[in-house]
Amino acid sequence: MTGTESGAPRKQRADSRRNETALLEAAAAAFVASGVNAPVRDIATRAGVGVGTIYRHFPTRADLIVAVYRHQVEACAEAGPVLLARSATPHAALASWIDLFVDFLVTKHGLAEAMRSDDAAFQTLHAYFLDRLVPVCAQLLDAAATAGEIIPDMDALVLMHGIGNLCIGADSPSYDARLMVGLVIAGLRLH
Amino acid sequence: MTGTESGAPRKQRADSRRNETALLEAAAAAFVASGVNAPVRDIATRAGVGVGTIYRHFPTRADLIVAVYRHQVEACAEAGPVLLARSATPHAALASWIDLFVDFLVTKHGLAEAMRSDDAAFQTLHAYFLDRLVPVCAQLLDAAATAGEIIPDMDALVLMHGIGNLCIGADSPSYDARLMVGLVIAGLRLH
DNA sequence: AAAACATACGGAACACGGTTCCGTTTTACC
DNA sequence: GGTAAAACGGAACCGTGTTCCGTATGTTTT
């Protein structure tokens, strides 16, 4: 008989919790060292666990990435309204916020690439980033449009997708992601 | 006639030439069906050859891609001066030319991704595209800058790199690469 | 404290794609 | 024809992601 009575579930085992935090730290270190595509085995070794343990805690790579960067994404999301309130104009707020977002992306080797992957395993990543950040971006766009500073009806999802793309390969010396993003922001302006 | 110059190399074997064209056709078909990252074995099977034969003719995947798309890249490169001569303004020529380039990229599933890969195997691809197209773009940019239509000193390499990036994932229904490229072009304008 | 049980672990094994290597076959030339 | 260079095929190898299951560990019960 399967005791399906939904009573008090056992609390998570101590070793499980330990391994989870060890994995998060190991993954963060590996991401810095080798980018977000660091081999699974590397991360497992760093954390001193077997590969199975990774998959048990983070079924897809995206889950791990989300877990590692959650705070930073949250910070970025929360910065939106703050910037809007404090900036001279909505357009300035938008530019500052996009700057934050770009900073975040370009400092995470390979994250921008991963963001746009259509691999099913990255669905979670995609979903999380977009769910969290697109509304913030939309708010900023809306404020700037209402103020007559930029073209109306710009789709926040498309814009973020495009900015993410522009940040791919940002560490190449012959490329300048910020310059390109700047052109996009300039292109949004009414003139 | 049969030049018997000393050291005259044997002419290429007939089977070799046959296989090369078979491979080009097979690769073109595979690229259409599965994108430019189609498995090597698939291409070999389509062409009815062994995998070794692919590597003998095209040491890297980039070599194969370049061979398959050479005509189209040439056509794009040659269109630059023509557009410049025929368009109302240099800026219009630039916009039209970039449109051509974007068309080329978005219709080749996975090509934009491959273009930006820093994998050593794609060095050839990178080099060929840039060698062939960047000067054309630079000429258009220069003409438009001289005419006072756009900001001066825009680096053609950075611009093409960025446009290539924007075309990544262009087949996603929730994205619009052309819209983003349009923003960039608008951003180039002096205002 | 020990038994009983659920939970979590480790890492071998598998899948898959790129790449190399070498014995065999085909072709060009004499 | 004969011979040697050129080219071929595909098995074998490597690096990664992913799965699976016998074992170990932690928790609860007696």
Image: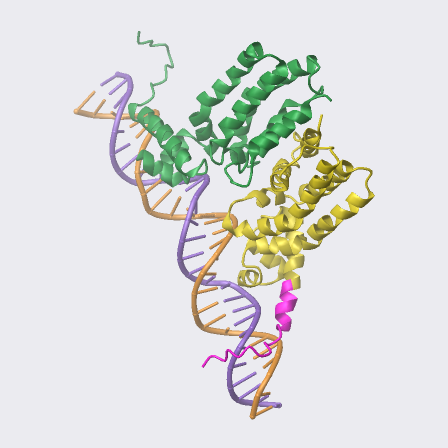
Chain colours: A yellow, B green, C purple, D orange
Check the picture and name the quadrant holding the C terminus of chain A: top right
Identify the residue at horizontal 61%, vertical 42% (top origin): A157
Question: In the displayed structure, does residue B60 sit left or right of residue B148?
Answer: left
Q: How many marks?
A: 0
Q: Which residues are magenta?
A: A1-20
Indicate the position of residue B69 as horizontal and vertical percent values.
45, 26
Identify the residue at horizontal 68%, vertical 24% (top origin): B188
Indicate the position of residue A92 as horizontal and vertical percent values.
77, 37
Q: Is residue A42 at all visible to an observer of this figure?
A: no
Identify which residue, B170 or A89, lies in the foreground.
Answer: A89
Location of residue C2 with respect to A80 vertically, above or below:
below
Identify which residue, C23 or B180, lies in the foreground.
Answer: B180
Question: In the displayed structure, does residue A52 sit left or right of residue C16?
Answer: right
Identify the residue at horizontal 45%, vertical 38% (top origin): B37
Q: Is residue A14 magenta?
A: yes
Identify which residue, A141 or A76, lies in the foreground.
Answer: A141
Identify which residue, A77 or D21, lies in the foreground.
Answer: A77
Indicate the position of residue B168 as horizontal and vertical percent values.
55, 36
Indicate the position of residue B155 as horizontal and vertical percent values.
67, 23
Chief SS of the magenta region: loop
Location of residue B41 with respect to B155 vertically, above or below:
below
Q: Is residue B12 magenta?
A: no
Check the picture and name the quadrant holding the N terminus of chain A: bottom left
Q: Which quadrant of the view contains residue A7?
A: bottom right
Identify the residue at horizontal 55%, vertical 77% (top origin): A6
Q: Which quadrant of the view contains residue C23?
A: top left
Q: Is residue A88 at all visible to an observer of this figure?
A: yes
